[in-house]
């Protein structure tokens, strides 16, 4: 009967005292019977009892062997080991505190990094079978550029002609002005095909999504809210269904709300996460014609059953070849290549190098922490030499001694893991708050159950690792030798122990040097980036954005009049010296256009950055005008289109020639170059300068002119007080205009450095932690060696050795250990620096300054850590030292 077997199995655990009493009675009976037999053989009472005990053997071992066959004996022994480990820690609180703090730092750093990796790289997107989802976009490898998606017409053709996808969906970024009686606001949105929800395998929280019929331009006035926007604007009311929202002067009916976990799939140029709402993607007949206007339609598809990524790529190329034959004027000679990659592969590729660097750095911090605690445990084991010798002499097995030492290490690291979890929570929350915004999932990083499981496993693993050093040392205990050394100061004095502890210190210092080198390289790179001129003067510049939707501003003259009125009123603000208008800002926006040179093959087009600006934009931003002129009132829509290019474009397309008067082709327009402006860093300070074309915002009509950025230059002291005045002036001209993103250009420049600053600070923190732990380890080992040699030092002092010689001798030991670590750390640091070369800017991975500073810092700190034990060695009292022998 299974229930009876279960009771029998558990009985020894609950009736332990009863079984012990039974065992004592049984052994007593055997002893009495054996004593009686010895007495009958002629021995006296005392001799018979002694002979009986010798015949039966060690009663304690007999009891131990008997208990071994009882169920749960291993658990009982483990409990005893835990109790003993706890008692040891309570008796030595200083040792316990240092060890726990050390492990908390190591485990906390690794747990924090794992929580970031879990949120950004390992966390599966909230879609059905995300491994079957792929992104599709167009790339131009010869030009070194890529589109965020594909042409609208190409999306239609991929959708209708493919044989590899179970479903395919398109979506485009959008923005709307919300004007429904409240203060106008600008919200980010996404236009999606009705198939997106089926493709991703997601559904609404309440209501419904879109139908195919609602993708027609005249029937597309429905919206699905994001969970966040639903909570913010409608307080989570389920009665929101059927309500209307005025977007760009049109009424949209709310038909559904997405669940809180819904996010958009990452693409090479990601959608803001999350958008406030979704509306149907309604392409017009003009959008679906060849030649296409732009490639703004992002595409996500689900692979069909049994279809591999390779075969899906072949199918996409097949469709592309068909379209090339049908539309040679669009597809021939443009260098375009369709790219099909697993979902979020591009974002993962950009994020992985930094996070892997963090993981390796945190791993080295943990390695140093483990070495430190192993050293502390070796010192404790040496101090407990008499205890271990006595336990071994009394019959404790080698396995039991090893288990006890491993248990003590596990208890220390487990407690350290608890505090490490608390530290990781702090680090993770700070990293999620101050980290770069473009990393998907970073804002949602937290210490969840997965991270806690990782911490538990890491704590147990490090506990075993830390306990291995003393366990190996005492795996073959020599009771006589240990008892002989136990009374001396320093305890265990074997060469093996000294070498093991010294080796651990070298390992710590080498790891610290490696991290110092890597942190130094990132700091040097950051300094180099700060030396880069952005090409404009950000000091004293405030920017404010607004938008002019087509329904409210259907014609360009009215928009121009409102912009000029706003600019004129902004100039009246105190401290303002100049106000300009642009559609795009450096380091904040990105707009590229395809251009061709007059007289060349129209298919030989090139990519260039573009911004539509007012004539005084260059002076307001502090951009140097190298030659020629900017835009004037004469550059009207009726006049020949003018353009200003940057120096990089002039040098690329007209090297050694004057580009002024040359013509370029863009979107059916012919642009005449009238000026050359200085180079401006548009994407990032550490990115190369690319060709740029500026056009007059009042001459060229484009979708970009539906938004405007007012560039306001004034005295720096007045900028902080201008924000509210800017908002009031814009709304006084038109209350229906949203005002958003009011900030200084200095904050934009600082924001562009957020990712690099984040990586530098986090790695520097790891390096500083590693340095501190390595110094503590060196100090502990030298203190141990001085204590071990107390009697020797006392004899030398008694014989007349100068104290200074002893100081230099101990300092020499510390310097030799540190120097060995520096050499090994510098060699491994060179390998690590080469591996992280993609994170560097303006310096070589083998930058001498970084290696020299790291080595010097460690040697100086090592000298400081060695000085205290050295002074202690010189202060040994010979009489006390000799008396200890």
Image (spheres, helix red, strand yellow):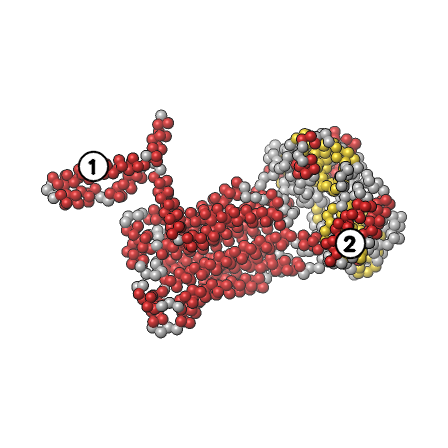
Up-down: is 795 above or below 602?
below
In the image, which disc is placed on residue 712?
Answer: 2
Residue at (50% x, 52% y) in the render? 105
Quadrant that contains the C terminus: bottom left
Across and down, in percent, residue 150 comes to 72, 41
Q: Which one is in front, 193 or 544?
A: 544
Q: CA distance from mark 2 to mark 1?
A: 102 Å
Residue sitting at x 36%, y 56% = 382
Task: Specify the quadrant of the image occupied by residue 273.
Answer: top right
The image quadrant that residue 247 belongs to is top right
Give the mark nearest the N terminus, 2 or 1: 1
Q: Secondary structure at mark 1?
A: helix
Residue 104 left/right relative to 546: left
Badge 2 density bin: few <14, some 14–19, many ≥20, Cα 10 Å: many
Q: Position of residue 215 (x, y in %)?
A: 74, 32
Q: Which mark is residue 122?
A: none
Looking at the image, residue 554 sits to the left or right of residue 118; the answer is: right
Q: Is residue 94 above or below residue 254?
A: below
Marks counted in the figure total: 2
Mark yes or no: residue 664 visible. no
Which residue in the structure is indicated by mark 1?
Answer: 29
Residue at x 59%, y 49% (from the top left corner):
431
Please tell me how crowded label 1 is: few (under 14), some (14-19), or many (20+) other residues with Cα within 10 Å: few
* Quarter the N terminus occupies: top left
Q: Position of residue 662 (x, y in %)?
A: 83, 55
């Amino acid at each position: 009967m299974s229930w009876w077997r279960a009771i029998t199995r558990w009985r020894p655990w609950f009736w332990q005292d009863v079984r012990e009493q039974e065992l004592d009675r049984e052994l007593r009976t055997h002893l009495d019977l054996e004593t009686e037999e010895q007495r009958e053989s002629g021995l006296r009472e005392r001799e018979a009892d002694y002979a009986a005990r010798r015949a039966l053997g060690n009663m304690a071992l007999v009891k131990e062997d008997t208990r071994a066959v009882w169920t749960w004996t291993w658990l009982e022994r483990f409990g005893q080991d835990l109790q003993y480990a706890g008692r040891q820690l309570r008796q030595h609180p200083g040792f316990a505190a240092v060890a726990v703090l050390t492990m908390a730092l190591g485990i906390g750093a690794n747990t924090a990094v794992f929580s970031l990796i879990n949120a950004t790289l390992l966390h599966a997107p909230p879609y059905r079978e995300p491994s079957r989802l792929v992104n599709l976009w167009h790339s131009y490898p010869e030009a070194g550029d890529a589109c965020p998606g594909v042409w609208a017409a190409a999306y239609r053709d991929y959708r209708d002609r493919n044989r590899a996808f179970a479903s395919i969906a398109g979506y485009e970024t959008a923005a709307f002005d919300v004007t429904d009686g409240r203060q106008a606001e600008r919200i980010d949105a996404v236009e999606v095909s009705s198939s997106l929800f089926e493709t991703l395998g997601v559904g609404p929280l309440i209501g419904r999504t879109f139908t195919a019929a609602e993708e027609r331009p005249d029937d597309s006035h429905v919206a699905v809210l994001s969970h966040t926007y639903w909570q913010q604007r409608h307080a989570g009311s389920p009665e929101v269904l059927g309500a209307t929202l005025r977007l760009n002067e049109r009424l949209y009916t709310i038909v559904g709300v997405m669940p809180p976990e819904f996010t958009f799939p990452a693409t090479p140029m990601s959608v803001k996460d999350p958008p406030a709402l979704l509306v149907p993607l309604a392409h017009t007949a003009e959008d679906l014609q060849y030649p296409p206007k732009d490639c703004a339609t992002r595409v996500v598809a689900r692979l069909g059953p049994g279809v591999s990524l390779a075969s899906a790529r072949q199918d996409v190329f097949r469709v592309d070849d068909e379209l090339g034959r049908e539309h040679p004027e669009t597809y021939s000679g443009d260098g375009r290549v369709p790219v099909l990659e697993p979902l979020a592969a591009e974002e993962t590729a950009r994020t992985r190098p930094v996070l892997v660097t963090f993981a390796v750095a945190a791993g080295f911090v943990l390695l140093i922490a483990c070495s430190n605690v192993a050293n502390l445990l070796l010192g404790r084991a040496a101090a407990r030499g008499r205890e271990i010798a006595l336990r071994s002499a009394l019959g404790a097995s080698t396995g039991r001694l090893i288990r006890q030492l491993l248990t003590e290490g596990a208890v220390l690291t487990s407690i350290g893991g608890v505090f490490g979890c608390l530290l990781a929570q702090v680090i993770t929350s700070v990293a999620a708050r101050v980290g770069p915004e473009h990393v998907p999932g970073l804002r949602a990083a937290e210490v969840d159950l997965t991270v806690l499981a990782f911490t538990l496993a890491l704590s147990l693993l490090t506990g075993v690792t830390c306990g291995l050093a003393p366990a190996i040392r005492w795996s073959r205990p020599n009771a006589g030798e240990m008892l002989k050394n136990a009374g001396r100061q320093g305890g265990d004095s074997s060469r093996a122990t000294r070498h093991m502890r010294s080796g651990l210190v070298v390992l710590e210092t080498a790891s610290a040097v490696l991290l110092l080198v890597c942190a130094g390289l990132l700091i040097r790179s950051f300094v180099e980036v700060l030396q880069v001129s952005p090409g404009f003067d950000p000091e004293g510049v405030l920017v404010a954005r607004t938008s002019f939707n087509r329904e409210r501003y259907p014609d360009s003259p009215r928009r121009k009049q409102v912009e000029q009125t706003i600019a004129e009123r902004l100039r009246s603000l105190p401290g303002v010296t100049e106000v300009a208008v642009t559609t795009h800002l450096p380091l904040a926006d990105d707009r590229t256009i395809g251009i061709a040179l007059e007289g060349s093959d129209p298919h030989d087009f090139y990519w260039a950055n573009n911004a539509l600006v007012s004539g005084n934009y260059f002076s307001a931003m502090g951009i140097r005008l190298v030659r020629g002129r900017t835009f004037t009132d004469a550059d009207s829509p009726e006049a020949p289109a003018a353009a200003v290019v940057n120096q990089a474009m002039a040098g690329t397309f007209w090297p050694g020639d004057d580009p002024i008067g040359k013509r370029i082709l863009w979107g059916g327009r012919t642009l005449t170059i009238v000026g050359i402006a200085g180079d401006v860093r548009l994407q990032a300070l550490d990115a190369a300068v690319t060709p740029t074309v500026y056009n007059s915002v009042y001459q060229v009509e484009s979708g970009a002119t539906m938004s405007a950025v007012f560039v306001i230059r004034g005295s720096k002291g007045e900028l902080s007080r201008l924000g509210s005045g800017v908002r009031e002036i814009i709304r006084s001209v038109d209350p229906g205009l949203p005002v958003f993103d009011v900030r200084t250009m200095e904050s934009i420049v600082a924001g562009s450095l957020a990712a690099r600053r984040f990586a530098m600070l986090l790695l520097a923190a790891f390096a500083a932690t590693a340095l501190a732990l390595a110094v503590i380890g060196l100090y502990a080992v030298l203190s141990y060696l001085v204590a071990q040699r107390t009697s020797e030092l006392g004899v030398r002092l008694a014989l007349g050795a100068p104290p200074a010689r002893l100081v230099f001798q101990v300092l020499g030991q510390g310097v030799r250990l540190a120097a060995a670590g520096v050499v090994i750390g510098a060699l491994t640091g060179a390998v690590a620096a080469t591996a992280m070369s993609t994170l560097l800017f303006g310096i070589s991975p083998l930058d001498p300054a970084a290696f020299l500073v790291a080595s010097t810092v460690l040697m100086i700190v090592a000298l400081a850590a060695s000085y205290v034990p050295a002074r202690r060695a010189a202060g040994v009292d010979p009489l006390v030292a000799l008396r200890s022998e």
